[in-house]
Amino acid sequence: MTKNIDSSSELVTPDYSEFIPAMDRRRMSHVQKMSIACALDCLQQAKIEQADAIIVGTSMGCCINTKNFLDKILDAKEGPVSPTSFIVSTHNTIAGQIALLMKNHGYNMTYTQNSLSYEQSLVDAILCCAEGLMNVLVGGTDEEEDSIYNMRARLKDDKILETSGASFFIVSNTKSKTGAVNLIDAGSFGLVKNTYETAVEFLQANNTTAHEIDIVLYALSGKSSLNELKSVFGAEKLFDYQEITGTYYTNSAFAMHYAIDILSNQPHPIFAEVKTVLVYNNLIPENLGLILLGTKNE
């Protein structure tokens, strides 16, 4: 089983030199390096040389570079500031850097909608495939940085364990010999009054009921909403994915990775045969992100 993280846990990183040339690597921030390495590794595992589109969801973007850029503006006292400082501070720097390294000239998009950034990216990836693109590289990534945006204050929870992470996937409209999971649907819902009704309606739109969901990987905005989630799906099906991801705004992408691992490696050590997994992202009270995954139909 996956080990739960705690305050002593460290982010697992690869040898970036295997993915990024030294000259480029020296100028990159942490979130850029981990995103690029993850994206390129994803393509290698999928045995795809070039993606038809690159879509990235990130709430905070290159937030450490953003802080550095703002500090330079203050230090310059209304004087000139290097444009490079601005270029590497924008949210779409990540998707742009991936495209530059891949020499990719296809559709390139960044979504930044707080805790729904990854789900919005996934919805776009599904639409791209519906319009005929074969292989879409889609990911969610964020780095830990407190001085610009106080996550504990925003989520009204002093006990959260802030972390960083990057997860990338290939969404394809063709069957893969290496893939074993079907992305059934994804949804991004803002200003939601009743998250549970929205989830049930989402499942109904996909000809599925709460009873048919085998596992719900969830993140909630507070303990008070857990009882209602239990009443809808059953307590035995629930797992708080933040126990293994920590808290960052696109951690539902990591939860999707975990769901794919569960669906791909049967039987599960705790649950019986798993055919359907729902990622239920209610990290911010008024936001609801849903990702429905199932075993591949042969």
Image (spheres, rainbow, N blue to C red):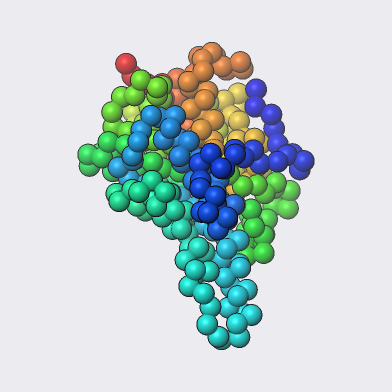
Residue shown at the point (59%, 52%) measured from the top left:
30
- Quarter of the rendering occupied by the C terminus: top left
Q: How many marks?
A: 0
* Residue at the far bottom in the pictured view: 78
Q: Please give left or right for residue 107 compared with residue 266 in the image.
A: left
**Could you tell me residue 191's position as x and y percent?**
46, 55
**Could you tell me residue 41's position as x and y percent?**
48, 36
Residue shown at the point (27%, 36%) measured from the top left:
134
**Could you tell me residue 157's position as x and y percent?**
69, 52
In the rendered view, would you say 215 is above or below 94? above
The residue lying toward the viewer, choosing from 28 and 207, is 28
Residue shown at the point (34%, 28%) measured from the top left:
207
* Residue at the far right in the pictured view: 8
Residue shown at the point (45%, 20%) measured from the top left:
275
Please say whether residue 60 is visible from this viewpoint.
Answer: no
The quadrant in which residue 10 appears is top right
The residue lying toward the viewer, choosing from 281 and 128, is 128
The quadrant in which residue 145 appears is bottom right
- Quarter of the rendering occupied by the N terminus: top right
* Residue at the far left in the pictured view: 132
Please say whether residue 296 is visible from this viewpoint.
Answer: yes
In the rendered view, would you say 158 is above or below 199? below
**Could you tell me residue 4's position as x and y percent?**
69, 32
In the rendered view, would you say 72 is above or below 251? below
